[in-house]
Amino acid sequence: MIQFSQISHQYLNGHLVHALEKINLTIQSGQFIALIGPSGCGKSTLLRLAANLIQPTQGQIQIHGESPQQAVLNKRIAWMAQQPALLPWLSVQKNIELALKFQKKPSSIQKQTEQALQAVRLTEAAHQFPNTLSGGMQQRLALARLLVQDADIWLMDEPFAALDELTRENLTIELYNLWSSYQPTVLWVTHNIYEAVKLSDRILVFSPPPGRIVGDININLSQPRQENSPEFQKLLNQLRNILHQDQELHQ
């Protein structure tokens, strides 16, 4: 479980920016949560707070009863960003092995690496270097690195945003299958409302800054979800209405 209690956050960027305001939120273990909203509304800030990369101006975060700092030290959290941040001088296999070397629990590095490569369909590329991979393959490698960390929580900040539409769609399907197998708690930042409805079982809608949660929608559609179904379209319209109505209030 992740609990955000009265979280507000401000920072200086030439002027004082009010990123988040009084966020109260409980996320149950194993949920796949999509965070949507306009740019600058604090979605990524919330992830950075949970990852202990920054400290909240006000409020408290508890992760399985621990502080974010303790959760990071106990290897509960894994991070995946828009850029894969691969080491270009290491092979695909060595990039994964490096992540395993920082794990708290001793394990068979070779076996876990092979399992991760197989899970993301990169076994045949094990000895290639990142600059020889396509964008989609690089993000699959980043996903494999996420898997081997064996973390309870995956914090994912628009990891497929820079990819073409077809590659992105294929990777979201792979991600859903991996989540179904591993059952981590996922916080997924996206600007794509189709993607949010297709993947998640709960969607949090953020207001323009200072970010507040103005929509909390449970998705009860069975998988695989069909975008042309009436239920899918109804949810899309509901999300659009929340986003547009709140944006109008801030104009």
Image: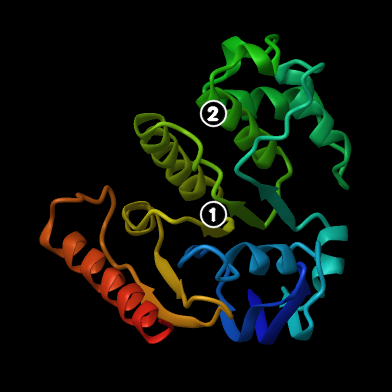
Question: Is residue 237 left or right of 151 when viewed as pictured?
Answer: left
Question: Is residue 99 left or right of 82 when viewed as pictured?
Answer: right
Question: Is residue 66 left or right of 166 when viewed as pictured?
Answer: right
Task: Place residue 185 in its image quadrant.
Answer: bottom right
Question: What amino acid is found at the position of numbered circle 1 in the picture?
Answer: Gln
Q: Position of residue 208 (x, y in %)?
A: 49, 75
Give the residue number, with chain letter if any, for mark 2.
Answer: 120
In the orientation shown, which residue stands out farthest toward the front?
Answer: 14
For marks 2 and 1, give the one nearer the viewer: 2
Question: What amino acid is found at the position of numbered circle 2 in the picture?
Answer: Val
Give the residue number, with chain letter if any, for mark 1.
Answer: 183
Query: Considering the image in quadrants, where does the N terminus appear?
Result: bottom right
**Front-lying residue, 208 or 230:** 208
Residue at image point 79% right, 20% down:
94
Q: Mark 2 or mark 1, which has the lower sequence index?
A: 2
Residue at image point 56% right, 78% down:
211
Q: Position of residue 33 (x, y in %)?
A: 49, 64
Q: Is residue 121 above or below residue 244?
A: above
